[in-house]
Amino acid sequence: MLNTNKINTGRRFQGFASQYAIYIVLVLLIIGITIYNPSFLSVNSLRDILIQSSTRAIIALGVAFILITAGTDLSAGRIVGLTAVISASMLQSSDYAARFFPNLPHLHVLLPIALAILAGLLCGLVNGLVVSKLNVPPFIATLGTMVAVYGLNSLYFDMEPNNSQPIGGLRKDFTAIGTGYIGEGQYSVPYIVLIAIFVAFIVWVIFTKTKLGKYMYAIGGNIQAAKVSGINVAKYLIYIYAIAGALYGLAGVLEASRTGGATNNYGNMYELDAIAACVVGGVSTTGGIGTVPGVMVGVLIFTIINYGLTFIGISPYWQLIIKGLIIVAAVAFDMRKYAAKK
Amino acid sequence: MAEREFLLEMNRISKEFPGVKALDGVTLQVRPGTVHALMGENGAGKSTLMKCLYGIYSTDAGDIVLDGNKVQINNSKDALNLGISMIHQELHPVPFRNVMENIWLGRFPTKGAGFIRFIDHKKMYRDTKELFKQLDIDIEPDVMVGKLSVSKIQSIEIAKAVSFHARVIIMDEPTSSLTGVEVEHLFRIIRDLKKRGVAIIYISHKMEEILRISDDVTIMRDGSKIGTWPASELTTDMIIAKMVGRDLTHRFPEKENVPGDVILKVEGVTSPIPKSFKDISFELRKGEILGIGGLVGAQRTELIEALFGLRDIVSGSISLNGRPVKIKSPEDAKRLGMALLTEERRVTGIFSVLPVHENAAIANLGKYRKALFLLDGKRKKQEADHMVEKLRTKTPTTRALIMNLSGGNQQKVLLARWLLTEPEILLLDEPTRGIDVGAKFEIYTIIKDLAKQGKSIIMISSEMPELLGMSDRIMVMSEGRLTGIVDGSSATEEEIMRLAAQH
């Protein structure tokens, strides 16, 4: 009896350490940077970090859906590019010289946004169908989508009269979404941050309070057992890929709005950042494990590395090396954690 | 010097797993150039003994003597180096490589000099040809293994064992997936191996085969050795009597259920796979426990998975409460009030990284729908907790991950999962496999209680006492066919064994 108690306490401590490891890393990172340059701890830095994290967070949440089902999504970045171009192409000022659609009437701002999100959703739907109905491994299915979506986007982007010119001159009511804020001066809160927080909340609800969320964990945890339990695995995988696609669509819209433009190269390789953030945030690449707070912290860690290390003057090349190490260390830690319990 | 009588001696081998004494002082003596059959019911300890010999398990006590020398076998590499090979029941070749690469894997012949070495494919081809010629195996060394039949892959495995200069070859159920002609070919190879002085330890359930091919027979029961006899002195009946021989008192709860009207009627159900189940007809009554007995390969699992919509059925019909039904998927089955506890708890049952209460609730989420898409998480957890507790599952809290529970407790959580869906028919596939004795009784009690409450149960079991102690009726299958349905209270193990070995 005594013996088992001891083991339990040991396990509990290990459990605590591994459960909160990423939060500890986050705090250590902030403390380190602050010691080096105390002016890092300011409202301005915080706001910048949150703004930079917003679209990344939305993409990472989309990717998290897929990773938790034990899949992967390489097409996220290219879907972001496609939807950025779609929304930007229809929301240029009427007085801008090089309009994508010179004769396009003034549309309600929400219409192009909805179209862009729908396009993202359709891309995700294709991923889901290919994965669940044609049984193509997610890595390959989304690799195909990634390449094809870029081609599609480039064709659209190359249409007359645009001919692959960067899309600019976006309407104020559109760019306001990505650049505007509530409140005044130092304590103002950017809309884009609020949107990301709202999305994170919705995704958290889906993960923890809906059938779809429970099934997502079950499918990723053991797809055979999920089938035996009477879960329509194909149907739910399609839903999940479609939701992820819609999130990439939203992220694309926000990227266009925030930067005031779009090209067909928008979003390139964003999926890798998103996968890295998820993995560092405790989402298991073998499926079945992952939380929304974890993903958010994963995203923040990467933004803070970017922003904070630039702030204290560390070369971006060194930043890449540090990022790489963190990704591998996080997964090695994750593997150890679950291998030990087998 | 006179030739030694025994090539291999395993003396007083004991092996204990937590809560189970798997081997209790078992002695096995094998003469060179003979086939030594090892028999016993599932769980008698045959495989455990062989795993000790092959270095997969360590022994707690006893020693192994090979050719007069005491040997230490810590892993399968040691075993191979000593000339002990094992042909597993499930073969694991590298499918997309050719035959010769599979045989010489890890020890490819090379040519060249110094650090620069290349694989000598020509030599490998020649060596393989030569090896096959010796064994009278007709397979081209450069065909892809994935294209070959199970029987040919098995021949390759045997050739591989011979290429290791094996003196003792363990064959675990080698004929379980072979056709009659293929069995003859295997026996030819075995006779040839005997002539070279190789000893073969042969595990099988098939009496007729054992009596034909083996020289000596050792029978085990409950982790102990019953004895060794020359095969010529044994008959099928004698073997069965020796394998069985135990009393059944107090291992099972009292029978209190009373079977009622027919609830499920299965007629002429046949699988699209030719070697699988064919033309199976039976009825299941309300509140009845229907056992399904048979040997490995009897296609029992395939049958109940088909009833649950996990496998296809080409012909035949199923009716539930007199209404014909089509069950195309587990969702259909669940909707019709069926539940399935699979044999491979880890592979197709538990979600190891999820907590106990989530594992219990997962099949029943439809019932906890609230407004919009939201689930009533509180009620879900309460009901799951309640059911898990009702089955007396031992877990620190229901938030614990299911992978940290023992096999018996995991099984109770899976039972809880299905009981939450309020099924009328429970299909249980080897419900107590890998569960220790104490927990077995608890599972038996739960099953009997369910039957008493009017639930209908189909239970596959490979353990004779369990079949006899639990079932109201027992249907026996052999090689995909139904060979008989017997009354649970009057049937004998001998009767069931005979039906199971019919085809």
Image (cartoon, rainbow, N blue to C red):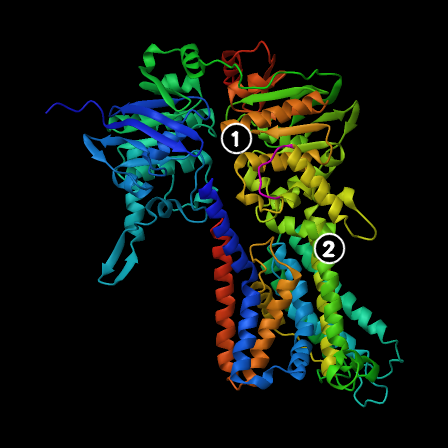
Compared across the picture, whether A243 is left or right of B491 comes to: right
Quadrant containing the N terminus of chain B is: top left
Real-space CA distance between mark 2 and mark 1, rounded to the nearest whole angstrom: 37 Å
User: Which residue is disc 2 drawn over?
Assistant: A239
Percent position of residue B195, x then y: 25, 26
Percent position of residue A121, x then y: 75, 63
Q: What residue is at 29 percent from the left and 35 percent from the top?
A: B84
Which type of secondary structure does the marked residue at label 1 adopt? loop
Percent position of residue B165, x then y: 25, 37
Q: Is residue B495 above or below residue B306?
A: above
User: Which residue is disc 1 drawn over?
Assistant: B433
Identify the mark at residue A235; answer none if there is no mark.
none
Q: What's the residue type where badge 2 is placed?
A: Tyr
The residue mark sitting in front, 2 or 1, is 1
The segment highlighted magenta reads B391-397
User: Is residue A314 at least partly visible in the picture?
Assistant: yes
